[in-house]
Image (cartoon, helix red, strand yellow):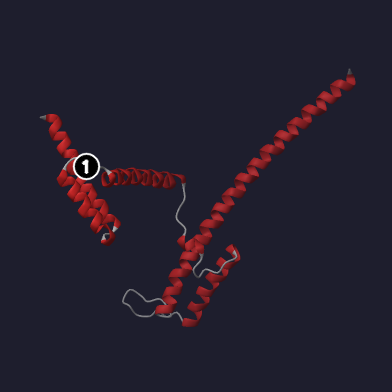
Amino acid sequence: MNDATERLRRAAQNEQTVIALNDLLREREARLAEAERKHLTAARALVKAFNELNAIRARDGVPRDYAGMKTGVSEEYFSSVVDDVDAAVLALTGLGAHCHPLLYERATDSATVGQDCQTLAALDSEDAARFRWLCDDHADKAIRHLRDSLLERMSVMSLSAIRAAIGIHLSNVSEQAKNSHHE
């Protein structure tokens, strides 16, 4: 019985050790994720800074003051600062700052992504209604004529102009339907 009790005690200790190690692992993973987030934020800021500083270097050589006069910073020093920022981006990301992918990356926090998805879904459903209007076999001869003339002009219209033109027709149809229900 003593042997069984000892094995049980060791098993309980092992279980506690595993739980403690899992907790430690989760804590380390959280710290690593936070460090990676900070690393990406710093790299993004440095890439943007390089882009702006490099534009100043290309345009004027050095920054200008509020009156539009070149500041007292030498072109060599300012150029070395821009190059140091580029070297820092290279050290952080493995890529130079010029045309770095972080310049073109959109924010992807969950609120932004959710809002973008809702906006796209709304646009998709509105475009579906417009497409149905274009494809419907309208009973009214005037609406069929409007649709046909729009189809003829679509090749030279922008997407926003097409959406606006169909939207006008759809709103007129819905207004007429409301008026006919109230009469």
Q: Residue 33, position in %: x, y? A: 59, 48
Observer-nearest of 182 and 134 = 134
Circle 1 crowding by C-alpha within 10 Å: few under 14, some 14–19, many from 20: few
Q: Residue 14, position in %: x, y? A: 78, 32
In the displayed structure image, the side of residue 75 where residue 96 appears, left or right: right
Q: Residue 103, position in %: x, y? A: 47, 63
Point 23% across, 52% down: residue: 164
Observer-nearest of 166 and 85 = 166
Point 24% across, 42% down: residue: 137
In the displayed structure image, the side of residue 157 where residue 88 appears, left or right: right
- The outermost residue toward the left is 183
Q: Residue 166, position in %: x, y? A: 23, 49
Observer-nearest of 105 and 118 = 118
Point 64% across, 41% down: residue: 26
Tag 1: amino acid: His
Name the quadrant of the N terminus: top right
Secondary structure beneath dot 1 equals loop
Name the quadrant of the C terminus: top left
Q: Which residue is mark 1?
A: 138
* On screen, residue 153 above or below 34: below
